[in-house]
Image (spheres, rainbow, N blue to C red):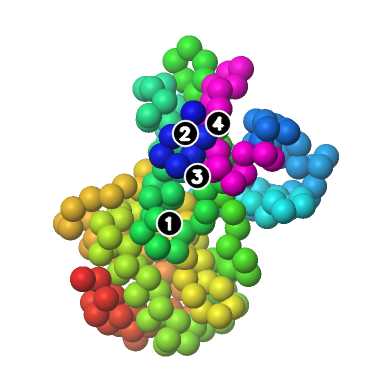
Amino acid sequence: MTVDGGRRVATAAGAMLIAPQNTGEFELSGDALFTPDYWRNNGTVTSASRGRGSTWFITAGSADWALRHYRRGGRLAAQTSFDLYLWMGESRVRSFVEWRLLAALRALGLPVPEPVGASYERGLLAYRCDLITRRIAGASPLSDRLAAGRLAPDLWRSIGTTVARFHAAGVDHADLNAHNILITPAGSCSIIDFDRGRLRRPGSWRDANLRRLKRSLHKLATASPPGRFTASDWDELLGAYAGDKG
């Protein structure tokens, strides 16, 4: 069964949504590919937890993927199971929603990771879910780049232009921060982690995205040597953003 460019595969406890070009790999190993233990036995796995989810980088053969297990954040996580979500139908499963959004954004030519597979396992009232995306070769988070040293003005402009492209396409990123912007050695930018992201009409959410990013950069700056993020850096970003957002 094909769904929004992906193939839906039923499992004993839930379902998987797989990109057509990766179907063969999943036919061999099924939903085991969504478990770090599988990769410890059949490849290499590196823990790289960030944000609310738990992320592992996995490599084996043609696979160079990021596997994310969805987890709750904040006070709610302390009051309930950290990775359980209320079942409201398959169309609302968070990993499936993000898979489809990534596929749509790639179709628009936006720089996001390629969605490889998504899965969920459900009980009577709740479910757990996971997402696999292809890693962007050579890319590192903006937060890591800032920790290593100052960024050149043209890189700040590249970030502003990239954010503007997403906003012009109506993409509301629910957690735009310095950890979710990736930069390659050549200076190209991508955006990752679209859990709760959506396509919207133009509105105040654009400014809210920028404010969230600025807070993230200020937070990093307070924990770094002086000068890693300055008012002029933000002006470079905003100038490029204003010139390209449409």
Amino acid type shown at disc 1:
Arg
Question: How far is mark 3 from mark 1, CA to CA?
Answer: 24 Å
Q: Residue at x 52, y 35 (%)?
A: 7
Q: In the rendered structure, which disc, 1 or 2, sits on the residue that comes first in sequence?
A: 2
Q: In the rendered structure, which disc, 4 or 1, sits on the residue that comes first in sequence?
A: 4
Residue for badge 3: 52
Numbered circle sitting on residue 106: 1
Between label 1 and label 2, give the one nearer the viewer: 2
**Depth check: 203 or 226 in front?**
203
Question: How far is mark 4 from mark 1, CA to CA?
Answer: 20 Å
Q: Is residue 11 magenta?
A: yes
Question: How far is mark 2 from mark 4, CA to CA?
Answer: 11 Å
* x and y, in percent, of residue 175 in the image: 39, 53
Amino acid type shown at disc 4:
Met
Amino acid type shown at disc 3:
Arg
The reply to whether the C-beta atoms of the residues labelled 4 and 1 are less than 8 Å apart is no
Residue for badge 2: 2
**Depth check: 61 or 207 in front?**
61
The span picked out in magenta is: 8-25
